[in-house]
Image (spheres, grey):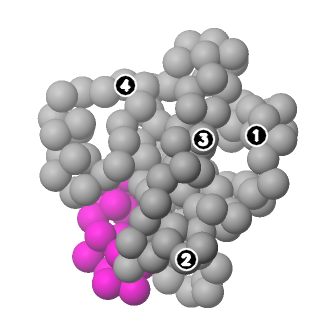
Amino acid sequence: MNQTGPIIVIEDDLDDQEIFSEVFKQLNYKNKIIFFGDGELALDYLIKTRIKPFIIFSDINMPKLNGMELRAKIHENEDLRIKSIPYLFFSTIAEQDNVIDAYSKSVQGFFVKPSNFEEIKSTIKTIVEYWQKCVSPNYVK
């Protein structure tokens, strides 16, 4: 895990992208924020880049390649798997089948998007600060 790497947000809803953007602006993290509108674009970036992202926030329901399919492809790709990038679902709903499926694919968290801005900001702050303190297999001090 690269704590100084970019934070990847995979979200097809432009309004939600704006909310994420404003949250990260207010939280003032030094990480670059990179948005993708679908899973295929995100996967292509993750495969081709040499940069090790810090964390991935992913929606579930997206066009082309949904969040579950994307997570499975990342988990099956050894080069991506050894980057130890925390992969979290941030979705409007948490259907039990999706939660079970997500954790069976070794997702590191499943969060329901809160309904108001301050709650979203608080949740994202908690998530990011947790992962900033977490040690991963490729930890180097």
- N-terminal-most mark, 1 or 4: 1
Residue 67 as seen in the image, left or right of residue 104: right
Determine which residue is flagged by label 4. Answer: 93
What residue does disc 1 label? 24
Give the CA distance from mark 2 to mark 1.
Answer: 26 Å
In screen coordinates, is 59 left or right of 30?
A: left
Task: Pick whichever of labels 1 and 3 is earlier in the sequence.
Answer: 1
Q: Which residue is mark 2?
A: 140
Q: Quadrant of residue 129?
A: top right
Vertical placement of 10 versus 50: above or below?
A: above
Structural crowding at the residue carrying mark 2, measured as other residues with C-alpha within 10 Å and reported as few (<14), some (14–19) or many (≥20)? few
Q: Which residue is mark 3?
A: 129
Circles 3, 2 touching at the beta carbon (< 8 Å): no
Where does residue 20 sit, x and y in percent of width and height? 69, 37
Q: Amino acid at mark 1?
A: Phe
Residue 15 in view (yes/no):
no
Disc 1 residue crowd, few under 14, some 14–19, many 20+, Cα 10 Å: some
Q: Label 4 sits on what residue type?
A: Ile
Report the label total: 4
Dot 3: element: helix
Q: Pick whichever of labels 3 and 4 is earlier in the sequence.
A: 4
**Residue 45 magenta:** no
Report the predominant secondary structure element of the magenta stretch.
helix
